[in-house]
Amino acid sequence: MPQLAFGHPEQGRYLVANVVWLLIIFGVLYLTMAQVALPRVESVLAERRARIEGDLEQAQASKQRADAALAEHQAATAKARAEAQAAIAGATQQAQAEAAQKAEALNARLNAQIGEAERRIAASRDQAMSALRSVASDAAEAMVSRLTGGADRAVVEQAVTAELAARGRA
């Protein structure tokens, strides 16, 4: 580069002129940059910074609203869950109470049927026992008649009654 050939005899005389023009051009460029270009760049950067800060504030506000909505949703969900559990518990209690009432009614009906069946059994047993006395007396009289040729009905009935009394079936 000839501008930097300081030791060269022919280039040395242009050195001062080159340095002067360098300073003039540098000054003009500096003033142009300082007065025109850099303020525009600074305004663009300031506008960009303001937009970013506004967007960040908007994002922060949106996040706070979303957090509030989430908390409200969680509270509503918890409330609904509690109400559902209460309703389930109430329905379960009601079903248990109805089942207990039905069981009680069924037990009462079954107890009544059992009591009636026991009365019929007792009546049938008493009837059978009275028939047993008659059948036993007839059978004993028939056997005594066959074996001895004759039997006294009153004596046979008295013997059957004594035997049944001894066995606890009188």
Image: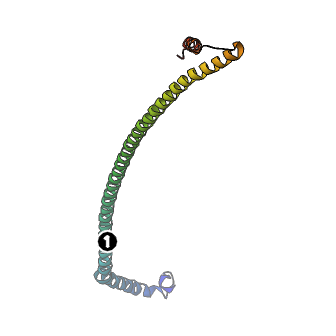
Give the quarter of the image for residue 142.
top right
Give the quarter of the image for residue 39.
bottom left
Residue 149 horizontal side relative to residue 128, left or right: right
For the point 36% across and 52% down, the residue is 84
For the point 43% across and 88% down, the residue is 14
Residue 131 on image: x %, y %: 55, 25
Q: Amino acid at mark 1?
A: Arg
Q: Is residue 157 above or below residue 42?
A: above
The kind of secondary structure element at disc 1 is: helix
Give the quarter of the image for residue 32.
bottom left
Q: Is residue 84 above or below residue 123?
A: below
Residue 3 on image: x %, y %: 47, 85
Residue 48 on image: x %, y %: 33, 74
- Mark 1: few/some/many CA within 10 Å (<14, 14-19, 20+): few
Residue 51 on image: x %, y %: 31, 73
Return the residue nearer the eye: 136 or 66: 136
Return the residue nearer the eye: 167 or 107: 167
Q: Which residue is mark 1?
A: 49
Residue 129 horizontal side relative to residue 25, left or right: right
For the point 60% across and 13% down, the residue is 152
